[in-house]
Image (tube, grey):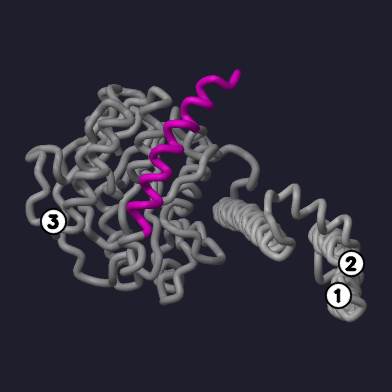
C-alpha cells in the first residue's frame, strides 16, 4: 500500500476504533460486541498496511488479485455479523417474551390472592 | 353444580384477546353462562383498544401482557398459568365470538372419554371438505392438513381451529418449545411426541366485528413460517424423545 493509502487507512480506522472504545466505555455498546469491532478493525488495518499479510490473505482466499479477495472477506464478515446480530435480537426477544409472560401470570395470580409461585387450590 | 359422581376435573377456559373490544364482553358472558363449573381467564395480549377497560367491568381474571406477543405466546401463557394452578384441562377459544361456548360441553364430554390428549373443535372433520372457504385459505388448509398427515401419520382437517381442549399431560411439552400460532406445528410436535390429537365437529359463526389477526404480508409469511416450524417440530420431538427425562 502507498504512503497515502496507509494515511487514509489510519484516518478512517483510528477514529472508528476510538468511537467504538468510547461507546463501550459509556456503556452504550456491550463489551462483547465492541471486541468484535475492535479486533476486526485492527486486523483489517494490518492486512491493508502490511503487503505480505495482504498477499497471504489473497492466496488463502484463492483469489488472483487482492481487491476481490478483500471484497470476498468483507462480504463473509458482514454476513456473519448480520447473522450474529439476528441471533442476539432473537435471544433478547425471547427473554422479553418470557418476562412478559411471567409478569402477566404473577400479576393475575396475586390479584386472585394466590401466591404467585404456588400451585392453585385443587 | 354437577351432581355426577365422576371425579370432577378442574377446567380452565382461556380466551386470548387482542383488540377485541367489540366482542369480548359477550364472549365472557356466554362462557360463564354455558360453563359455570369452569374457571375463566382472558389473556389480554397487549390490546390497544378498550379491551382492558371492558374486562375490568366483567370481573374476569385477566392475564395482561404488557405488549403484544402474538397468538401463540398468548396461548402459551394460558398453558403456563393452567400448569402452575394445577388445572386438569385447558379449553382455548377465540375472543371474536366465532366459537359458541355451548359447544364446549360436547367437546369436553368427548375429551372425558380419555381417548385424547388434545381435542380440536373442527369445522371440517365431518365433510372432510373446505366448502365455503376462500380459495387461498382453502389451499393453505389442505396443504397443512396434508403436511400433518405426512409428518405425523394422521390427518387433521382443521389445523387452524382456535377451539381446543388440552389435557394437563401435554402442558409441560407445550411450554418447553416455541410455537407460532399453536396450529399445524404444535399438532405435529405433540403427535410426534406420542400424544393423541383428535377432532370433534363444531360449527362456527361468521366474524361480525374486528378484523383477522393476519395481515396481507402474513398471508405469505404464515405458510412459510409454519412449514418451517412443522419440519422443526419433527426434529425437536425426535430430540426430546431421545433426551433422558
Q: Is residue A103 among what the camera can see?
A: no
Residue situated in front as seen by the camera: B123 or B62: B123
Q: To which quarter of the image does residue A20 belong?
A: bottom right
Image coordinates of residue B230 in percent, x first then y, are: 39, 40
Sequence-wise, the earlier of marks 1 and 2 is 1
Residue situated in front as seen by the camera: B22 or B192: B192
Q: To which quarter of the image does residue A14 belong?
A: bottom right
Looking at the image, residue B232 sits to the left or right of residue B142; the answer is right
Judged from the image, the secondary structure of the residue bearing numbered disc 3 is loop
On the image, numbered disc 2 is attached to which residue? Answer: A49
Counting other residues with Cα less than 10 Å from the Cα at mark 2, is it few (<14), some (14-19), or many (20 or more)? some
Residue at horizontal 30 percent and vertical 39 percent from the top: B1
In this rendering, is residue A84 above or below B81?
Answer: below
Q: To which quarter of the image does residue A18 belong?
A: bottom right
Q: Is residue B148 among what the camera can see?
A: yes
On the image, numbered disc 1 is attached to which residue? Answer: A9
State if disc 2 and disc 3 touch (CB < 8 Å). Answer: no
On the image, numbered disc 3 is attached to which residue? Answer: B133
Q: Which residues are magenta?
A: B221-245
Which one is in front in this view, the residue at disc 1 or the one at disc 3?
A: 1
The chain to which mark 2 is attached is A
Residue at horizontal 48 percent and vertical 52 percent from the top: B73
Q: CA distance from mark 1 to mark 2?
A: 8 Å
State if disc 2 and disc 1 touch (CB < 8 Å). Answer: yes
Residue at horizontal 86 percent and vertical 70 percent from the top: A1
Looking at the image, residue A9 sits to the left or right of residue B85; the answer is right
Image coordinates of residue B158 in percent, x first then y, are: 22, 43
Amino acid at each position: 500500500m502507498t504512503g497515502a493509502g496507509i494515511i487514509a487507512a489510519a484516518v478512517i480506522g483510528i477514529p472508528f476504533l476510538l468511537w467504538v472504545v468510547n461507546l463501550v466505555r459509556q456503556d452504550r455498546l456491550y463489551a462483547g460486541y465492541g471486541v468484535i469491532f475492535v479486533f476486526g478493525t485492527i486486523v483489517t488495518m494490518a492486512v491493508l498496511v502490511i503487503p505480505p499479510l495482504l498477499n497471504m490473505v489473497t492466496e488463502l482466499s484463492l483469489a488472483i488479485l487482492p481487491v476481490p479477495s478483500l471484497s470476498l472477506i468483507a462480504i463473509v464478515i458482514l454476513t456473519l455479523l448480520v447473522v450474529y446480530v439476528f441471533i442476539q435480537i432473537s435471544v433478547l426477544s425471547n427473554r422479553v417474551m418470557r418476562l412478559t409472560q411471567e409478569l402477566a401470570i404473577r400479576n393475575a395470580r396475586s390479584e386472585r390472592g394466590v401466591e404467585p409461585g404456588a400451585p392453585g387450590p385443587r | 353444580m354437577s351432581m355426577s359422581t365422576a371425579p370432577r376435573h378442574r377446567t380452565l377456559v382461556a380466551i386470548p384477546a387482542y383488540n377485541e373490544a367489540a366482542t369480548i364482553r359477550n364472549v365472557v358472558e356466554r362462557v360463564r353462562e354455558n360453563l359455570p363449573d369452569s374457571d375463566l381467564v382472558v389473556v389480554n395480549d397487549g390490546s390497544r383498544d378498550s379491551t382492558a377497560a371492558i374486562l375490568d367491568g366483567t370481573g374476569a381474571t385477566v392475564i395482561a401482557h404488557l405488549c403484544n406477543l402474538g397468538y401463540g405466546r398468548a396461548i402459551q401463557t394460558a398453558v403456563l398459568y393452567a400448569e402452575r394452578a394445577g388445572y386438569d384441562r385447558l379449553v382455548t377459544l377465540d375472543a371474536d365470538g366465532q366459537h359458541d361456548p355451548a359447544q364446549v360441553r360436547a367437546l369436553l364430554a368427548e375429551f372425558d372419554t380419555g381417548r385424547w390428549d388434545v381435542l380440536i373443535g373442527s369445522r371440517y372433520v365431518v365433510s372432510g371438505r373446505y366448502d365455503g372457504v376462500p380459495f387461498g385459505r382453502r389451499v393453505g388448509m389442505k396443504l397443512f392438513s396434508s403436511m400433518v398427515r405426512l409428518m405425523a401419520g394422521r390427518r387433521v382437517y382443521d389445523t387452524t381451529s382456535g377451539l381446543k381442549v388440552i389435557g394437563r399431560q401435554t402442558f409441560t411439552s407445550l411450554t418447553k418449545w416455541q410455537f407460532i400460532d399453536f396450529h399445524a406445528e404444535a399438532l405435529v410436535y405433540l403427535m410426534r411426541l406420542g400424544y393423541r390429537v383428535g377432532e370433534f365437529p363444531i360449527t362456527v359463526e361468521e366474524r361480525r366485528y374486528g378484523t383477522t389477526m393476519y395481515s396481507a404480508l402474513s398471508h405469505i409469511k404464515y405458510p412459510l413460517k409454519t412449514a418451517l416450524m412443522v419440519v422443526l417440530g419433527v426434529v425437536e420431538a425426535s430430540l426430546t424423545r431421545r433426551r433422558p427425562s
